[in-house]
Image (cartoon, rainbow, N blue to C red):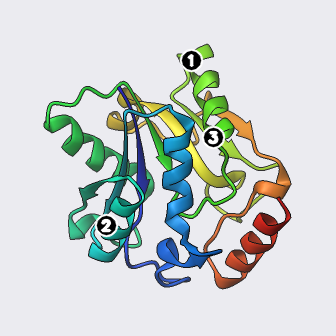
Amino acid sequence: MRIAVIPARGGSERLPRKNIKPLFGKPIIAYSIETAIASGLFSEVWVSTEDEEIGSIAQIYGAKIHWRRLAMAHNDVGTQEVMRHALHDIMAKGNEVDYACCIYATAPLMLPEDLHRGFRALMEKPEAPYAYSCALKPQREKGLRWDAGQWYWGSERSFLNEIPLDADDVIKIVIPDHRVCDINTAEDLRRAEQLYSSL
């Protein structure tokens, strides 16, 4: 089966509680959950969190909760570690996962078609470990500079075998500039509000 996992720890530092900040009447994580469900691509949509408030909100909007160990909720734990942890736990309960999509909790500009484009690209090039949303302009100085901050698809093997996201054969799916906003600061959130209003 295919699942979505939305990492959403409670201790975000640059923008505290960013995963449940209100955006036009809804917690921002609700947009990611609703878009994942609306895509029809997933048997299950999970939110991985250690935070009870985030977990309660996620359940209201239709997600299952993967309760993350506190050791996996520190700032230096990346999304791929969270994905491996979640997949191990979910599959240990007897679930057979073929493909998973890591969806960021702060992706209100993401559309169901974006997720479909990523999955189709991965199916057309099955030797690729991942397909991820990227921007036309650099989003940060280090790391995945072109990451649009929305999602990345991968096979279960890619996640569990710790294949890096910057591998040479990773597929990049370009998201239009007017829907790219990687939200880490209050300024990013204001920009996301402006972009969302203009859609």
Between discs 2 and 1, the one toward the N terminus: 2
Residue 149 x, y percent position in the rendering: 63, 56
Cα distance in 3D space between marks 3 and 2: 23 Å
Label 2 amino acid?
Gly
Q: Secondary structure at mark 1?
A: helix
Cα distance in 3D space between marks 2 and 1: 32 Å
Q: Is residue 196 above or below residue 172?
A: below
Residue 103 x, y percent position in the rendering: 51, 50
Label 1 packing within 10 angstroms: few (<14), some (14-19), many (20+):
few
Label 3 amino acid?
Pro
Residue 68 x, y percent position in the rendering: 25, 61
Q: Secondary structure at mark 2?
A: helix
At horizontal 64% and vertical 23% (from top left) the residue drawn is: 121
Label 1 amino acid?
Met
Q: Which residue is mark 3?
A: 112
Q: How many numbered marks appear?
A: 3
Dividing the image into 4 quarters, which one contains the N terminus? top left
Between discs 3 and 2, the one toward the N terminus: 2
Label 3 packing within 10 angstroms: few (<14), some (14-19), many (20+):
some
Q: Which residue is mark 1?
A: 123
At horizontal 37% and vertical 76% (from top left) the residue drawn is: 10
At horizontal 56% and vertical 59% (from top left) the residue drawn is: 31
Residue 27 x, y percent position in the rendering: 52, 72
Cα distance in 3D space between marks 1 and 3: 17 Å
**Quadrant of the image occupied by residue 122:** top right
In this rendering, would 59 be left or right of 125? left
Which label was assigned to residue 55?
Answer: 2
Q: Is residue 59 above or below residue 135?
A: below
